[in-house]
Amino acid sequence: MLSYVVFGVFRRSGSPLETSLGIQGLAVWLLLILPVVGTVLGVMSWNRKEVKAWWAIGVIVLNIAMILTGILLLVPT
């Protein structure tokens, strides 16, 4: 989640990195893949009762929060 915050700061401030929006958008899409996979694995783990329910729910909620943060970073300001 920290990577989203740092990336958002670089994207919104006129950083000296001056990366193109295409590369930034690609990076955000790649960062969205991991929370999606984590959410799917959390749901599968919850259904199979591999871990305690509160642990699986916590993982799912945190991954969904990361997905929403990444989607907000994709919206140009």
Image (cartoon, helix red, strand yellow):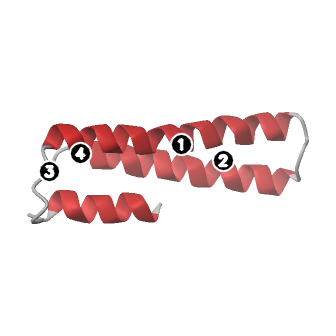
As measured in the structure, the alpha-carbon distance from the residue carrying label 2 to the one carrying label 3 is 32 Å
For residue 19, the mark is 3
Instruction: Return the disc, 2 or 3, that comes first in the chain's sequence.
Output: 3
As measured in the structure, the alpha-carbon distance from the residue carrying label 1 to the one carrying label 3 is 22 Å
Residue type at numbered disc 4: Gln
Return the x and y of residue 9 as percentages of the image width and height.
Answer: 24, 65
Which residue is disc 1 drawn over? 34
Which residue is disc 2 drawn over? 60
Which residue is disc 4 drawn over? 24
Q: Give me the residue at 47% from left, 45% from top.
A: 67
As measured in the structure, the alpha-carbon distance from the residue carrying label 4 to the one carrying label 1 is 16 Å
Return the x and y of residue 40 as percentages of the image width and height.
Answer: 66, 34
Mark 2 and mark 3 residues within 8 Å of each other at the beta carbon: no
Q: Secondary structure at mark 4?
A: helix
As measured in the structure, the alpha-carbon distance from the residue carrying label 3 to the one carrying label 4 is 7 Å
Residue type at numbered disc 2: Ile
Residue 24 position (above or below residue 9): above
Instruction: Return the disc, 1 or 2, that comes first in the chain's sequence.
Output: 1
- Out of 56 and 35, give the one closest to the viewer: 35
Mark 3 and mark 4 residues within 8 Å of each other at the beta carbon: yes
As measured in the structure, the alpha-carbon distance from the residue carrying label 1 to the one carrying label 2 is 12 Å
Return the x and y of residue 52 as percentages of the image width and height.
Answer: 88, 53
- Between disc 2 and disc 4, the foreground one is 4
- Between disc 2 and disc 3, the foreground one is 3
